[in-house]
Structures are given as C-alpha cells and as structure tokens.
Image (cartoon, rainbow, N blue to C red):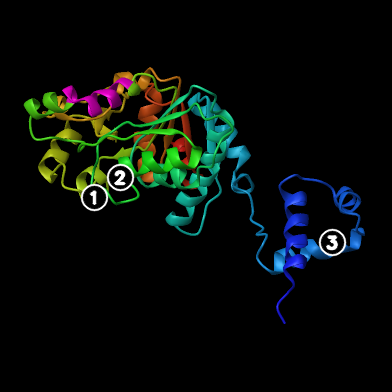
Amino acid sequence: MPRPRRSEDMIVRVARMRYEQRLPQTEIARLLEVSEATVSRCLKTALDLGFVEIQVAPKAFRDAALERRVKLHLGLRFAVVVEERSNPTQAIDTVGKAVARVIEDMLKPGDVLGVSDGATVAAIAGAARKVPTTDLDVVALVGGIGAPEQLTHSSEVCRRMAAGLGARAWQMPVPALVDDRRTAKILHDTAGVRGVFQMMRKVTFAVVGVGSISPDATIFREGFIDQAFMDDIRARGAVGTICARFFGRDGHPVGTGFDDRTMSISLEDLAAVPVRLAAAISPDKAPAIRAAVEGGLVNAVATDAPTARALLAGR
C-alpha cells in the first residue's frame, strides 16, 4: 500500500528542520507537537526512502599535517592536500570537492574568480555550490583547447563554475592558440574577447591547472604543439605550462614563437592576482608546481598526498 502523502510530507518536513535548519530533535518535537520518538522515526524513514543522503564531507579526506608541511616548506598562503586515493579519478574528484568548499569560504562580494581548463579545475567547477552573495564574476583565463563540449574545456569550466556559484560567466569564445598575429589582433579587438581580457585584469582569485612538458600535457595531446616543439622548449629550460604559457625552473616565462597569438592571461598578469591557486595532481608535475611557486606564479596549492610528498622531497 502506498505511503499516505501526509505521512511523506511530515517526514520531509522533519528532515529539512533537522538537516537544513539544524534544529535539535527536541526542538522539532516541540514545534510540531509530536514525540521525540516520532521525530527519530521520521529521520530514519527519510534516510530509508532516499529523501536524505549521508555523505562524508570532503574535509574528512584532507591531510592537515601534510597541508601544514607543504605550506611552510613552499611558503604558501595556504595548501589543500587530500589523502591518497585508490585511483587518479578519485583523487581529482576529492580535490575538486575540497577546493570548492575552500573557495566558497573565501569568496567575497565583488570578487572575480579566474579559472583555467584541465581535469582538476573542472572537478572544482563541478563541485561548486551557490554562495550567499550574487555579486561575483567568473572569467576564463585561457581560450579553448580541445572540443568545446568537453568538461575540461575552459569555456565549460567557466560556465559550470559560474552556474554552481550563482555568478556571472565570462567565457573565452576563441581557441587558446590562433593561426597568426593578425588573427589574434582582430579577435582581441572584438567586443566579446576584449571584455574577457579586461575582466582578467580584475581577477582577485585564480584557480589554474599546471601542466608538465610531456606527452600527457593537454596542449600536446590536442595537437597544439608537436614533439619537435616539445623537445625544443624543454631544451630551453621549460618545465611547465599554465594557461598555455610556458615557464622554466625559476618560474620565469620561456618564450615561444606563438606568444603573441596565444589567447590567455599572461604569466605576468597572473602573478599580480592576489590569490593564485595551482590545482594539479601527479608526482610527475611536482617540478612544474614547485617552479610556479618559486616564480610567484601561484601562492597556494591543491593536490593529493603523493604529489605533496614529491613537493616536499624536491628541495
């Protein structure tokens, strides 16, 4: 026999009072003029029927001791380090949820959040939740790499982050690398692109992925650079990329033949942002993350325990 609608209404009402309003069971019983036993039964039934889901909060997976060590070792503003997970997908998902909660706590009215592309930044965007203020902007810091429908594409990351936070979205409607300098200038002069670059200069909090110079890097996998270029840029001292810009072991830019046709924030402008969080997972990326910190490109790091230990062992 179906459960009476009135009974379900009571179960949902009790659950919302307990978990949304955080009222104690005694207070719920008093307000609804029922016994505490009835409240307890309603809460159990709400769980059984799927009206309530219990999850372990992302903070439970954070390694506070490693966070303190990484923060002190690298001189960071803050660090987010999650425990080692069983596979990279779980690690990325856990870092995404943990960082999303940190961002929610740190954002203030009037802030402009800049985001890059990449799997870890995409996971953060996917875990974003609405914040109390509506006076927020989210801007893409780099043009597109790969298919626009990919969750890791910069425009999709920007859109999902803004939707989650309840903010305005400023997507970059062009590729990260265009064919020539003339095309880049024409695009820069269009209202849509010009507005995005103007908003970049107002960013107060940046969340960026960090890539290593390897075949696994998105910019290589998607065909933006070939093996010959990768060998050359590595020989000239490049160790990592942020927003399709290359940098060396000292964190300083390593020039390419296409800097003037790269549609992204410059490393100099990134270094001027007050809060600059590198979100990256993989011990292989430790040299690139460390270089970005030493060069002032980032001043906070979000990663997993294996990568954190690699950062600590690096110097």
Where is residue 16? Give x, y as percent: 72, 52
Checking the image for residue 153, the label placed there is 2
Can see residue 255?
no
The mark lying in front, picked from 2 and 3, is 3
Mark 3 and mark 1 in contact? Answer it, CB < 8 Å.
Answer: no
Q: Is residue 268 above or below residue 303?
A: above
Q: Which residues are magenta?
A: 188-198
Q: Is residue 38 above or below residue 238?
A: below
Q: Amino acid at mark 1?
A: Ala
Q: Main secondary structure of the magenta part?
A: helix
Name the secondary structure under disc 1. Answer: loop
Residue sitting at 56 percent across and 49 percent down? Answer: 83
Please check the rendered image and state whether residue 195 is part of the magenta-colored stretch, yes or no. Answer: yes
Q: Is 38 situated left or right of 147 in this image?
A: right
Checking the image for residue 101, the label placed there is none
Distance (Cα) linking label 3 and label 1: 50 Å
Q: Is residue 221 above or below residue 68?
A: below
| Quadrant containing the N terminus in the rendered view | bottom right
Mark 2 and mark 3 in contact? Answer it, CB < 8 Å.
Answer: no
